[in-house]
């Protein structure tokens, strides 16, 4: 029997706070749809602009990565964070990135053989403003 793939949600654009708010809203919808006991991971590029909206819990792991284009810095911080996230076998992973300027390179990384059997990219390039 194969393990279920983690659903990967890509959130980009707008401000850090708006991306974090969009992820919080999506998590609220998931909980309302009966997924309140699923483990979820959030990986946010950038640093908060004020009060954090998302708080870590037993079922929600929040990882904040210093600003910097993932592909331009060699994807190292993304790969480390993603590998750690996948070891926790989450139902959903939210990846909040500042810009879609290099989305094609990011998607290539996410479709790497190391991730192809572990991730289902089901929400791509959705800007929130």
Image (cartoon, rainbow, N blue to C red):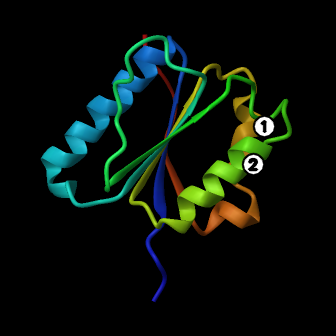
Name the residue: 61% across, 20% down.
98
Q: Are marks 2 and 1 in contact (CB under 8 Å)?
A: yes
Between 16 and 11, the one lying in front of the other is 16
Residue 66 percent coordinates (x, y): 67, 27
Can you identify the residue that label 1 sits on?
105
The quadrant of the rendering that contains the C terminus is top left
**Residue 103 image position (x, y, % from top left):** 69, 31
Residue 74 versus residue 48 in the image, above or below: below
Q: Report which quarter residue 64 is drawn in.
A: top right
Q: Residues within 10 Å of mark 1 (few under 14, many from 20)?
A: some
Residue at point 50%, 11% (across, down): 15
Q: Residue furthest bottom?
A: 1
Q: Secondary structure at mark 1?
A: helix
Q: How many residues crowd around disc 2 within 10 Å: few (fewer than 14), some, or many (20 or more)?
A: some
Tally of numbered tags: 2
Please state which of residues 98 and 116 is positioned toward the viewer in this rendering: 98
Say left or right for 26 vs 118.
Answer: left
Tell me the residue that label 2 is attached to: 109
* Whole-number angstrom distance, CA of label 2 to CA of label 1: 6 Å
User: In the image, residue 42 lies at what x, y percent?
Assistant: 47, 42
Residue 92 tag number: none
**Rendered image quadrant of residue 83:** bottom right
98 relative position to 59: left or right = right
Q: Can you say whether 111 is above or below 64 in the image?
A: below
| Whether residue 104 is situated above or below residue 128 in the rendered picture | below
Element class at badge 2? helix
Percent of width and height locating residue 80: 70, 52
Q: Quadrant of the N terminus?
A: bottom left
Residue at the image position 34 percent from the left and 36 percent from the top: 55
| Residue drawn 60% across the image and 23% down it | 46
């Amino acid at each position: 029997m194969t393990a279920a793939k983690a659903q990967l949600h890509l959130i980009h654009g707008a401000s850090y706070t708006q991306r974090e708010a969009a992820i919080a809203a999506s998590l609220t919808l998931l909980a309302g749809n009966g997924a309140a006991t699923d483990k979820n991971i959030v990986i946010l590029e950038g640093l908060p602009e004020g009060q954090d909206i998302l708080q870590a819990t037993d079922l929600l792991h929040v990882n904040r990565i210093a600003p910097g284009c993932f592909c331009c810095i060699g994807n190292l911080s993304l790969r480390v964070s993603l590998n750690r996230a996948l070891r926790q076998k989450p139902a959903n992973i939210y990846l909040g990135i500042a810009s879609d300027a290099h989305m094609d390179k990011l998607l290539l990384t996410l479709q790497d053989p190391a991730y192809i059997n572990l991730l289902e990219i089901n929400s791509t390039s959705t800007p929130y403003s």
